[in-house]
Image (tube, grey):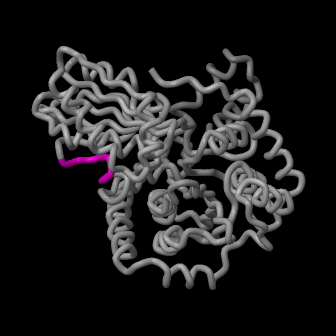
Amino acid sequence: MRPHLDTTQLQATVASVLSDVKARGDEAVLDYEERFDHVRLSSLAVTAEEMDEAETLVSSELKDAIRLAHQDIYQFHEAQRFGEVRVETQPGVECWQKSVPIERVGLYIPGGTAPLFSTVLMLATPAKIAGCQEIVLCTPPDRQGKVNPAILVAARVAGVSRIFKAGGVQAIGAMAYGTGSVPKVYKIFGPGNQYVMAAKQQVSLGDVAIDMPAGPSEVCVLADDTANAAFVAADLLSQAEHGIDSQVLLIATSEQLLNTVQAEVDRQLAILPRKDIAEKALQNSCFVLVDTADEAIALSNAYAPEHLIIQMHDYEALASRVVNAGSVFLGPYACESAGDYASGTNHTLPTHGYATAYSGVNLDSYCRKITFQHLTAEGIRRIGPAVELMAAAEQLDAHKNAMTLRLAAIE
């Protein structure tokens, strides 16, 4: 159902850029900025003066909107804090987990046709809550060497530590390997085009962790004859305008609704500023007629969409049957845009069917769980003989001996 992309040539190009960044550091990044972003930079770091200037360039209304969104995102992710539980598995054997933040994380924010300052909030807010010591952000500059001011304002609101003017594959390489300016991070987060995604996957093979594999963005809408056709069309188009490789899928139990939605899509598309992009994305898209809501939910679970919108009269009952989706939007008023910006849930989600196995970004994405155990003499007596037997059966005599010595010491 999803369009297939042949990425063989792309992978070779990405590998070449990554190798160059690894070898030449800042010099390579600056060269690629000139080549790909058409700007000759004297340095990569965004200065304090540029941060202050950005504050004057963003309207007070937009700043208020950014703060409202940040507050909701903060509230939702703060509630995800891990509670430590100590378990006595046997008398004298105590085990527990501790949640520890990743010390240094890298965030990639695309520039391109839409500067995604909302993604700054989505990625930096949970990183800050988790307690990451250093939050590094890379984003491409414009041809004047400036970063979009809304990105800088959002970064300040959300608590980003350092910002660098670097886009594309060179930005991923800089954060993966470290350069003179950009520190090496332990995990890279954030969306991007197919070159960025390929770069993230390549560096994840041996140098740095990544949030998740990802493909183009997508939405699946389930609708019945109670759905508002104008709302459905608007939701499909809001996804389609992301990029020409985006995909929208409508699964409906009413043929009349499908026809009405198609007419609404045509009407709304005609007046969209990003009409050309949305039009191309719609070529990858499908409208599917099914007989029942059961068939609709089964097809959606098989597709495993990044965004799932359920505009059906029994949306609450259907919600309990969702097993594969990145984020789910219930009822006529829960448009994808709400989650993209300000409801509080995270919009960095698994695409391309990865929702069968991956979660969207959440507080745990920025943490590691370290396990601890403490054993007393009584604990050794309880589990020691079993450990000896199991180690001997696996022919790991040094393992057995470590327990045998302790058992002998306590007798």
- Residue 372 at least partly seen: no
Residue 8 located left or right of residue 364:
right
Q: Is residue 17 magenta?
A: no
Which residue: 20% across, 42% down? Answer: 230
- Residue 50 at least partly seen: yes
Residue 315 located left or right of residue 103:
left
Q: Residue furthest right?
A: 23
Image quadrant occupied by the N terminus: top left
Which residue: 84% across, 45% down? Answer: 19
Q: Residue furthest front?
A: 270
Question: Residue 285: x, y in percent?
Answer: 40, 28
Nearer the observer, 88 or 79 = 79
Residue 120 located left or right of residue 258:
right
Question: Residue 384: x, y in percent?
Answer: 59, 30
Q: Look at the image and give the residue range highlighted in magenta.
A: 333-338
Question: Residue 348: x, y in percent?
Answer: 46, 48
Q: Is residue 91 above or below residue 341?
A: above
Which residue: 77% across, 29% down? Answer: 398
Question: Residue 83: x, y in percent?
Answer: 39, 54
Residue 28 located left or right of residue 93:
right
Residue 265 placement: quadrant: top left
Q: Is residue 128 above or below residue 1?
A: below
Image quadrant occupied by the C terminus: top right
Which residue: 46% across, 46% down? Answer: 242
Count of numbered circles on the image: 0
